[in-house]
Image: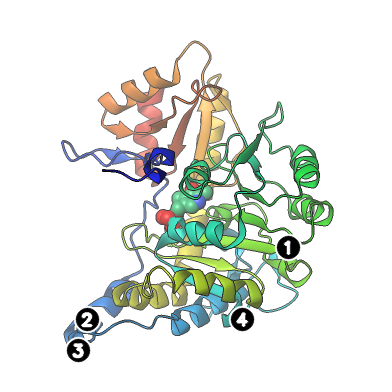
């Protein structure tokens, strides 16, 4: 009854979304702050005054949304937590994040969450005739898509300090003339490569093969690779509205790369689903980009709480990796990760634990509001 392909599928397991109790959710790296009121207002106005448009197909090219994403990136440099908010409510990038060339609409592709966008990217650029090079521990959807598209993998162990081993990634890609994918900052570690380190990967890896950098968490720290697009035509950057733009419940993700590559992704999208970004998502997404200043302040609050949690854990003998994201990856000697997860859940707070050998001692804690983090700290203190 079933296709042979089905056997290759090993679905991704997202952080649980239980209904039995009102947990504080620190397990799926969602944003603790609500969308800006202008986003809700845009949706309400649309429903009140243009509801007939719900009966019509949305813009398949998401043109207005792509323009607004470009504006947001140009005014923030792709790192919201460092963008300066000016008196008129617009943003400018920090000097470190300034873009040498502006991002334009033809450099952007938009889809139904970055998971879907990643699926299109895998289909567009990766073949089954050679392995895809990726870190052993990184976003666990990449191996799922490799199964989906029958792409062999070469998983490169992390360094002893849990950083991505860029030298080993480079030599693996050179040996098999392969493409590369990784998240930067990486998940679930939270550690980031510098832009210079990514540039070195691009310099040494095969020039005619794609390097995908997933910047899902870049707005919370680290350095974006957007400035490298001017120099590297094989660089594909994937970003999402889900984390820094408080948008996980609607769905929007996007690619930024050279226009020729974007065109190819459009070909794949138009061979699968013309309209992955629905009218409501496009409407709300446009309003979100215009409220970048609000999300920049939220990203700063999250980064502050993250650093405070890191200090808290380290002062109490935890081993906690540095984080350039909205989560912390940490373990405590003598406490199994699964036990910490269970004890914290009993107290009404959900965090994430992975059974995967090698990281099973760790828990991953999403950064919430100040109040939520105080509650979490009390629970951890009592452990
Ligand atoms: C959360 C996450 C995504 C998925 O984001 P969506 O846009 O919600 O699909 C992609 N990559 C990484 C590394 C993530 O952590």
* Vertical position of residue 198 compared to residue 100: above or below: above
Mark 1 surroundings within 10 Å by alpha-carbon count, few (fewer than 14), some (14 through 19), many (20 or more)? few
* Vertical position of residue 297 compared to residue 314: above or below: below
Q: Is residue 370 left or right of residue 158?
A: left
Q: List the residue tagged with mark 3.
A: 49
Can residue 15 be seen in the rendering of this structure? Answer: yes
Q: List the residue tagged with mark 4.
A: 104
Q: Give the residue drawn at x 65%, y 52%.
A: 222
Q: Nearer the viewer, residue 237 or 303?
A: 237
Q: Are marks 2 and 3 in contact (CB under 8 Å)?
A: no
How far apart, in angstroms, are the residues tagged by discs 2 and 3?
11 Å
Q: List the residue tagged with mark 2.
A: 54
Screen quadrant of the N terminus:
top left
Q: Give the residue drawn at x 44%, y 74%.
A: 270
Secondary structure found at label 3: helix
Can residue 302 be seen in the rendering of this structure? Answer: no
Label ID, residue 96: 1
Q: Is residue 205 left or right of residue 218?
A: right
Callout 3: CB less than 8 Å from ligand 1: no
Label 2 or label 1, whichever lies nearer to me, is 2
Q: Earlier in the sequence, mark 1 or mark 3?
A: 3
């Amino acid at each position: 009854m079933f296709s042979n392909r089905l056997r290759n599928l090993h679905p991704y397991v997202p952080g649980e979304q239980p209904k039995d109790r009102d947990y504080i959710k620190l397990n799926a790296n969602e944003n603790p702050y609500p969308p800006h009121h202008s986003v809700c207002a845009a949706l309400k106005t649309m429903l009140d005054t243009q509801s007939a448009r719900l009966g019509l197909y949305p813009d398949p090219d998401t043109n207005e949304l792509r323009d607004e994403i470009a504006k947001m990136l140009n005014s923030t440099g792709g790192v919201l937590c460092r963008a300066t908010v000016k008196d008129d409510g617009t943003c400018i990038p920090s000097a470190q994040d300034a873009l040498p060339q502006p991002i334009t609409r033809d450099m952007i592709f938009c889809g139904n969450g970055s998971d879907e966008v990643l699926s299109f990217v895998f289909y567009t650029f990766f073949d089954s005739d050679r392995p895809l090079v990726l870190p052993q521990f990184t976003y666990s959807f990449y191996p799922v898509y490799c199964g989906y598209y029958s792409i062999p993998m070469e998983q490169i162990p992390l360094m002893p300090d849990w950083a991505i081993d860029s030298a080993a990634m480079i030599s693996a890609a050179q040996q098999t003339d392969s493409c590369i994918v990784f998240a930067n900052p990486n998940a679930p570690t939270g550690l980031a490569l510098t832009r210079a380190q990514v540039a070195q990967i691009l310099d040494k890896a095969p020039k005619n093969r794609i390097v995908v950098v997933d910047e899902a968490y870049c707005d919370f720290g680290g350095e974006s690779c957007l400035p490298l697009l001017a120099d590297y035509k094989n660089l594909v950057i994937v970003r999402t509205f889900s984390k820094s733009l408080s948008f996980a419940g609607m769905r929007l993700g996007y690619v930024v790369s050279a226009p020729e590559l974007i065109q190819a992704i459009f070909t794949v999208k138009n061979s699968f689903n013309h309209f992955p970004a629905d009218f409501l998502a496009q409407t709300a997404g446009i309003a979100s980009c215009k409220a970048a200043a609000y999300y920049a302040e939220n990203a700063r609050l999250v980064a502050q709480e993250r650093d405070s949690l890191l200090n808290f854990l380290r002062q109490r003998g935890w081993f906690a990796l540095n984080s350039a994201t909205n989560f912390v990856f940490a373990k405590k000697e003598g406490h199994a990760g699964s036990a910490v997860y269970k004890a914290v859940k009993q107290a009404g707070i959900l965090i994430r634990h992975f059974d995967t050998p090698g990281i099973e001692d760790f828990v991953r804690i999403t950064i919430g509001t100040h109040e939520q983090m105080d509650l979490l700290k009390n629970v951890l203190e009592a452990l």
